[in-house]
Image (spheres, rainbow, N blue to C red):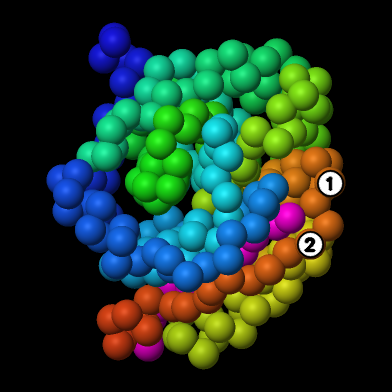
Amino acid sequence: MEQSKLRKPAVAGQFYQSSAQGLKEQIESLIDNKAIKIDAIACMVPHAGYMYSGRVAGATISSINIKDKVILLGPNHTGYGHAYSIMSEGSWQTPMGDVKIDTDVAKKIISNSRFLKDDSLAHLHEHSLEVELPFLQYFKTGLKIIPIAFLSDNIKILQEIGKEIAGTIKELKLKDSFTIVASSDMTHYEPHDVAQKKDKLAIESILELNEEKLMRTIGEFNISMCGYAPVIAMLSLAKALGAKNSKLIKYQTSGEVTGDFDSVVGYAGIIIY
């Protein structure tokens, strides 16, 4: 495979273990083997280092049946690339092996979208989708992905992208073949009690499957949730595919791991079905 088409890990050895065996053991320490699995349409999971948010991500992904194809929606922290960037070709490498992009579906999504652009630059150094892959690989061998990164918070466009993707999935008659994963952390670097209160408000909006309320709540209460754009797209997409229900699987802050409650980051795991 051409080097340009193999996306190398950007944060292996920093956010998670860099060896296959070490990473497998790390994931096994974070998942919930007793979780009852739901045929979820979508989920929201955090993307910090596994030490901090891995237990939330692990509990959430343990609670759903991962399908053959996963649409990954994440924020673009780096600022590189297009505002709505989908990588349509190649594979993503993790210590647990390579994950192929579903090129046929990705290109069909691009052709059906007024906004999504074929762009790998946005994904090159971005960690928000990469850190979800090992959890997904652990539960589903041979899965294919469609990675999409968002650099814009235009709610109308985000909602429209969700509907465009849903339209493509329906057109291809692949509704039962997809899991949608939105990657987001919650409040950043505020005291534990403040973070909990703010995050509760944002989580309520997500559980209500209400993108407009989420956007209003984030603005009104100054909630520093980094991945609200992909979550808005995910909610729009999931509802277009028939989602009616939601469940908070786990919430915690980094303070519960580090013992530093003065400046924490919040993490939530939610499933939509």
Residue 105 visible (yes or no): yes
Helix, strand or loop for disc 2: loop
Residue 37 located left or right of residue 122: right
Helix, strand or loop for disc 1: loop
Please identify the dominant SS of the magenta region: strand
Residue placed most toward the observer, 153 or 259: 259
In the image as oriented, which residue stretches furthest toward the top?
2
Residue 161 visible (yes or no): no
Residue placed most toward the observer, 42 or 159: 42
Image quadrant containing the N terminus: top left
Question: Does the magenta run of residues contain 88?
Answer: no
Residue 55 located left or right of residue 111: left
Segment colored magenta: 261-273
On the image, the x and y values in percent for residue 250 come to 54, 74
Question: Which label is found at residue 242?
Answer: 1
Residue under the image location 53 percent in, 76 percent down: 251
Q: Quadrant of residue 199?
A: bottom right
Q: Which residue is mark 2?
A: 245
On the image, the x and y values in percent for residue 160 come to 79, 35
Residue placed most toward the observer, 194 or 46: 46
Determine crowd level at label 1: few under 14, some 14-19, many 20+ residues with C-alpha closer than 10 A. Answer: few
Q: Quadrant of residue 263?
A: bottom left
Q: Amino acid at mark 1?
A: Gly
